[in-house]
Image (spheres, rainbow, N blue to C red):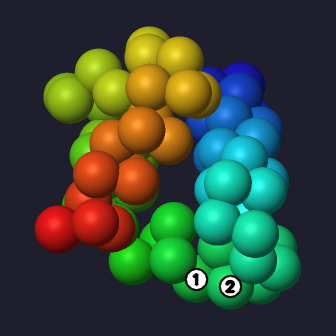
Amino acid sequence: MRDTVLWRKQSHIIIMLAETLQIDAERALDLFYSTNTYQQLSDPKYGLHLMSDQYILDNIMMEIQQ
């Protein structure tokens, strides 16, 4: 169940990323999976999966800008 919820959360974040950057979903997917934020989201010890989708998107955007 946890995996399904996390998968849906990741999907929503990828869609939000594509809309924010005005890129296609495939490019957003590649970008998402290349971030440290994704790795932290996948590891429950960070607790990032408990944060809102917008918070996670903001982390990704900050990471991309650096």
Residue named by callout 1 = 30
Q: From the viewer's perspective, is 5 left or right of 50?
A: right
Residue at point 53%, 17% (across, down): 52
Nearer to me, 60 or 5: 60
Residue 18 visible (yes or no): yes
Whether tag 1 and tag 2 are in contact, CB under 8 A, the answer is yes
Q: From the viewer's perspective, is 43 left or right of 25?
A: left
For residue 21, above or below residue 42: below
Q: CA distance from mark 1 to mark 2?
A: 5 Å
Tag 1: amino acid: Asp
For residue 15, above or below residue 34: above
* Mark 2 secondary-structure assignment: helix
Residue 29 sits in quarter:
bottom right
Residue 35 percent coordinates (x, y): 34, 67
Image quadrant for the C terminus?
Answer: bottom left
Nearer to me, 65 or 42: 65
Q: Residues within 10 Å of mark 2 (few under 14, many from 20)?
A: few
Residue named by callout 2 = 27
Residue at point 55%, 27% (across, down): 54
Nearer to me, 8 or 19: 19
For residue 33, above or below residue 48: below
Q: Which mark is residue 17?
A: none
* Mark 1 secondary-structure assignment: helix
Residue 24 percent coordinates (x, y): 82, 79
